Image (spheres, rainbow, N blue to C red):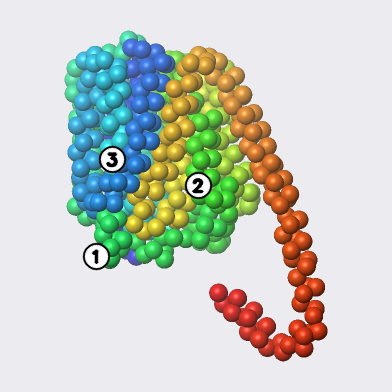
Amino acid sequence: MGIARRRVRALLTAGLLDSFGLSLGWTAFILIAVGRGGLAAAGEYNAAMLAGVVGSAPITAWYASRVDGRTLLTSTGSIELVLRVGTLAGLLIGWPPALLAAGVAAMNVAAWTGYAGMRAEVAAVDPGPRSLTRYAVAIATVEAIGASVAALLPITADGRLGGAITVGLLLAYGSSVTPQFWCARTSLVRSGREQRDGSTEPVVDPAQSVVDPALSAVAGYVGQHRRRPPVALPMPFGRRQLALATGALIMLIASGPVTLGTALAQQLYGHAAVGFAAMAFSAGCLLATPVAAGLARLRLPGHLRWLLWGAGMLLGWLIAPAHLIGLLAAQFLSAVAVTAFQGEMDATVAQAAEASRVTSALAWAAAVRACGSAVAVRMLPVLVAAPAIGVLSAAATVLLLGGGLMAVTVARLVAMARHPVAAHTQLTMPTQLTMPSQLTMPTQPAVSMLAGVDAG
């Protein structure tokens, strides 16, 4: 147990360093882009980033099935390092936006493939949802801190930055990926092909990885409370495929403002507000775990819980244009909702996946969320300007809650319409069982059959 904890702690430390540098450089990238091209430029590069996340899923599935964790982490880290420095330097030099967008997409393919590999390393040590949830919360928190530091950089209104600070930023942005190489040296994850062929003992026992789908990832949030047992909740929306599709739809409707939070903060209240907004987001990430635990204790249905996370991403933005406090509330609520939502989806997918497909399953979970967010951030600047974000958020909240509850109601009505057929079948069974020949049968075989059912 002590070795496992040290391994998780080492993976977490490496992930924190990497994510801090990534957030620092990416936030600076977006601030510079906003200064030079406005909210539309930020939307373009964020859409490219999310397109890379979506593209990383099939690449991760293919690559992880052929190489072990050491090769995956080393190769993706090397590619990401080059593209981090290259895209930021290209933006400062003045490369064409299309070329930069392509570089951003490729960088995020490498980054999220490596991120899926890091999460697979965590799952290899602790297959349960607790470590993965803590990992996701810690990463989201340190990313908010990195964004706060980036907001302190002396970036001018037209997107300029001093020479010495530029060099330091490029060094921090690129070198922060190096802890991933250390994790690669001590990797425990074997390739999917090796695990399927049985040529290598799987690190993650399939009996532990394939957990009953009835155990929701929210149980991981409350598992840390030793005095009370975890709350088992059903998987949201039933089947795994439907849950993933629903997750993408929720992100499409609700994640636009939070994904463009940095650009919106700058346009609404100026460069100085970006740091305060990032700190509010960081505080929300830290409180995501206890808030999710409290929601789990209410034993809410899965569909309602997911809809509430989506609404939480939007509600604060209703008042964000009115006052700086509204912006901070929007960032705080969005951080709580999006962090808990992502952690729950990741943990659920990791539990349901086979041992040889954990890495690719986690990549697909991130990809479906990113697919919805990519469309959202691309459309948001087209639909409204920054001052009108409250109106758009109100409409999205109504659409999400109203449409989601309506869809659930229709699904239940369909299920009720099918229920009488099953009920009629069950009602006819006693008529057959009351035949005289069956009434004279001994009761012991029936008891044995029931005992066998219970044992199974």
Question: Taking 163 as reference, is 115 left or right?
Answer: right
Residue at 49% of width from left, 54% of height from top? Answer: 220
Marks 2 and 1: in contact by CB < 8 Å? no
Instruction: Please identify, in this view, whether the residue under mark 2 or under mark 3 is nearer the observer.
Output: 2
Q: State which quarter of the image contains the N terminus.
A: bottom left
- Percent position of residue 162, x then y: 22, 16
Above or below, comparing residue 15 to residue 354 in the picture: above
Q: Mark 2 points at which residue?
A: 241
Instruction: Please identify, in this view, whether the residue under mark 1 or under mark 3 is nearer the observer.
Output: 1
Residue at 46% of width from left, 27% of height from top? Answer: 375
Above or below, comparing residue 226 to residue 299 in the picture: below
* Upstream in sequence: badge 2 or badge 3: 3
Examine the image and state in which quarter residue 405 appears. Answer: top right
* Upstream in sequence: badge 1 or badge 3: 3
Q: Mark 1 points at which residue?
A: 199
Secondary structure at badge 1 equals: loop
Q: Mark 2: which amino acid?
A: Gln
Q: Report whether residue 377 is seen.
A: yes
